[in-house]
Amino acid sequence: MRSLMRRVLLDTRYTLVGFPTTVIGFAILVSGFAAGLGTAVVWIGVPILAGVLMIARGFADAERGWLSDVLRRPPVRPRYKPAPEGAGRFRRLINPITSGQSWLDLLHGILNLPMAVISFVITVVFWALPILGLTYPIYGVVTSRIPGGDQELPELLGLGSGYGVNVVFNVSLGLLGLLILPVMVRGAALIRAGMGRALLTGVAELQERIDDLAEGRAAAVSAEANALRKLERDIHDGPQQRLVSLAMELSRAQRQMARDPEAAQATISSAITATRETLDELRALSRGIAPPILSDRGLAPALAALASRCTVPVELDVQVVGRFQAAVENAIYFVVAETMTNVAKHSRATVCTVQLTRTGNVLMLTIGDDGVGGAHVAKGHGLAGLADRLRAVDGEFTVSSPDGGPTVIVAEVPCA
């Protein structure tokens, strides 16, 4: 109830307080625009137009602040085109004219008047209805004593006459108005807010989305490049060195075969052992590329396999079923794999907990340990690569790891 009342009051403030502001803005902007346009041929109107656009920007910024309350979202302010570096005084003065958003601000200041009038009238009418209806028993005592004052709407509708009938009718009307007040006031606010969002924040929201996509793409490229470099380093330091050593062992066995068969047999046995170790290392590396169990069976079995291989005891709680997009499953898997590796190497933890749940269209991954803490996502650390990988799928990554622990890592990935 409290949140509903707060919403009604915010919407009412927007439509009532915004109405005189809109009227004042309309008068200033229309007169200023007409004066600037009429004198633009002699260049006097150019700085006038620039000034009008700056005034329109001020009214637009105020409207954006109100929109954040009505639409329940953070205010989005567009990026106005700055003056070129080294531009002269006149060029900086008329710079607002070169910004497309400035003209949208002016257009909003002019077109917003009819929307403000409609929303203002709706709000006043549907606030007056419950107030007048519910307070009729008070002022009706006075009006009923005025000659002819008891001839009211109930009598015209054939419902009867008299103070008692009027009280029942008006109070009932007031209660009905009180019930529909939140809906009508909300609708009145949205009538005006819709135009405001389209003209004042639409371009900014689109630009913000483009920036997010560009950042996600850059993060994906960075994450893949880092993963490839790490894979190349691991192959060079591990299987490649083992294969070189294996080739040397087999060459030695070949030379020993004729003169010392027993030594050759021992060398071959050693080579077989090295081959098995190399295969095990290659399998471990392949899990960092595309684990077959993930693509074949999904997240739950893949995470269970990871947990079984971790040297720290893992409490796994997977509360999701079904399959998701490959990019989403890969992101979740690699976050868990990298985090478990860090826990085993650096945390000195005695237990690690992994929980995967779904809330709406978001997968929520929570990983914790009781280790020494100190983990962070600074550039150059392993967790920074995980943050980049999640940004590539529009995910979010947060780390809480004070010195002394515990560490809690939360990843949110859209899965719609």
Image: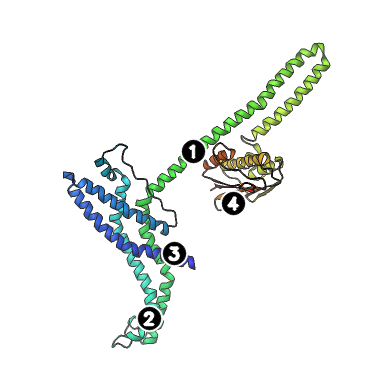
Q: Which residue is mark 1?
A: 217
Left or right of 98? Residue 389 is right
Name the secondary structure under disc 4.
strand
- Decide if residue 94 is in sight here: no
Q: Residue at x 22, y 45 (%)?
A: 46
Q: Residue at x 34, y 65 (%)?
A: 16
Looking at the image, is mark 2 or mark 1 earlier in the sequence? Answer: 2
- Tell me where residue 382 sits by quadrant: top right
Q: Circle 2 — which element?
A: helix
What residue sits right under mark 2 in the picture?
136
Query: How many numbered discs sit on the rendered protein?
Result: 4
Q: Secondary structure at mark 1?
A: helix
Q: Helix, strand, or loop for circle 3?
A: helix
Label 2 vs 3, first from the N-terminus: 3
Determine the CA span between mark 2 and mark 3: 26 Å
Sequence-earlier tag: 1 or 3: 3
Residue 100 in the image: above or below residue 232: below
Q: Amino acid at mark 4?
A: Arg
Which label is found at residue 7? 3
Q: Please, is residue 191 above or below residue 125 in the view?
A: above
Mark seen at residue 358: 4
Seen from the viewer's position, the closer of residues 356 and 173 is: 356
| Whole-number angstrom distance, CA of label 1 to CA of label 3 | 38 Å
Q: Can see residue 5?
A: yes
Give coordinates of residue 343: x percent, y percent.
66, 42
Q: Are marks 3 and 4 in contact (CB under 8 Å)?
A: no
Provide residue 77's location: percent of width, then percent of height. Answer: 38, 50
**Residue type marked 3:** Arg
Q: Residues within 10 Å of mark 3 (few under 14, many from 20)?
A: some
